[in-house]
Each structure stands twice: as structure tokens, then as C-alpha cells.
Amino acid sequence: MLSIAGHKLYAPKGIGVLYVRRGVRTQSVLRGAGQESGRRPGTENVASIVGLGEACRLAAERLRNGGTERMTVLTRTLLTRLRQAIPDIILTGHPTARLPNTLNVLFPAVYGRAVLEACPQVMASTGSACHADREEASAILRAMGIPEHKALGAVRLSLGATTTAREIDDAADALAEAWRKCVAGTARAS
């Protein structure tokens, strides 16, 4: 099975795809009519389905036209700039075998959430949206053997299809400045 959340590739929110390999049996989570081979009842949201199809077409076009390479260069630049400003910052995961538009880094000596709160011009995440109200280390990072105090410094940075090199430079500068403010604030509080 494969699920795709449409909003991750600029389709309307609320639309997605569920690919079910032939022979895999599923149960309906809703009762009613038998659309989609009995998997769900109700009328399809045709406008959003068309939007998802167009988003997929545009994503395929971006991939054919060097989108992956462009994202790889931009994330590499962002990481290099962050490492220059924050020598002890840590990249989690594999250095090259990862999504080309995403970095997960550990800011040293501070909570990732504090860095983001001090940096309103950058929209990023410290973890999954379903845990946004809690200050706890990611279970994934902990399973990777990262100590809790380091894992709490995690920030996930995702680039979009329209992200520019200038925006990368601005984000790196803003994040580094926010980190410095947080470290200074931590030192004063001690």
C-alpha cells in the first residue's frame, strides 16, 4: 500500500491517494454505500481530485527539469551555511541518501522550539504536527541513539518548489542569529 497526502505536493488540502496492491484486503472505516470497491461511501471531491492530478503533473515536470538537483544544491547550501555559523550543529540521518528538500538538524545547547520562536521569519518544525503541543524528544531520534538533551534541539527544515538561493541565505542568517540569542539567554539564566 502507498498513501500520498496531496498538500505535500501543492494539491488542495484534504485530498490524497491510497494505492492498494491487488490482492491486499482492507476494511472500510466508514459504513454506507460501496464506492471505491466498498472502501468508502460518498461522492468524490472531483475538483480536488483534478487539483491533485494537476499537482502530480507539475511535480513530474519539476523532476524532469532538474528539480531534485536544484533542491539538493539548496539544502547543501543551507547546511553549509548553518555549519559555518554554528559549528556544533548536527545533521541527523544520512548525509546524502535522503529527501533532497529536507534537513533535520540538532541545534546545540538549546531547544529547537526556542530557536524557532526566536526566528519568526522562518517556518519550520521541531517534529510531527501531532506532537506540536509538547516539548519532548522525537521517538525516531531517540531510536537512532541520540540522547534526549540533543534530540530536543531538533528542527526539520523543508524547502519548497519555489525556494530561492536568496531565501536560503536569509534563513541561514536568521536561524544562526536566533540560535545565538537562545544560547545567550540560556547563559544568562544559569
Image (cartoon, rainbow, N blue to C red):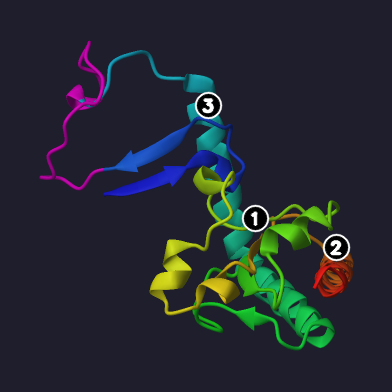
Identify which residue, 53 or 116, lies in the foreground: 116
Residue of label 3: 48
Residue at horizontal 83 percent and vertical 65 percent from the top: 171
Indicate which label's residue lies in the foreground, 2 or 3: 2
Give the label on residue 125, or none: 1
Q: Which residues are magenta?
A: 20-38
Give the label on residue 47, or none: none
**Magenta part, dominant SS:** loop
Against 48, residue 116 (above or below) is below
Q: Secondary structure at mark 1?
A: loop
Against 55, residue 189 (above or below) is below
Hey, what amino acid is under mark 3?
Answer: Ser
Q: How many marks?
A: 3
Is residue 158 visible in this depiction of the protein? no
Q: Is residue 25 magenta?
A: yes
State the separation of the CA atoms marked 2 and 3. 30 Å
* Residue 20 percent location from the top left of the image: 24, 43
State the separation of the CA atoms marked 1 and 3. 26 Å
Q: Secondary structure at mark 3?
A: helix
Identify which residue, 3 or 190, lies in the foreground: 190
Indicate which label's residue lies in the foreground, 2 or 1: 1
Is residue 36 visible in this depiction of the protein? yes
Mark 3 or mark 1, which is nearer the start of the sequence? 3
Residue of label 2: 167
Residue at horizontal 76 percent and vertical 84 percent from the top: 83
* Residue 12 percent location from the top left of the image: 58, 32
Q: Is 65 positioned to the left or the right of 44 in the image?
A: right
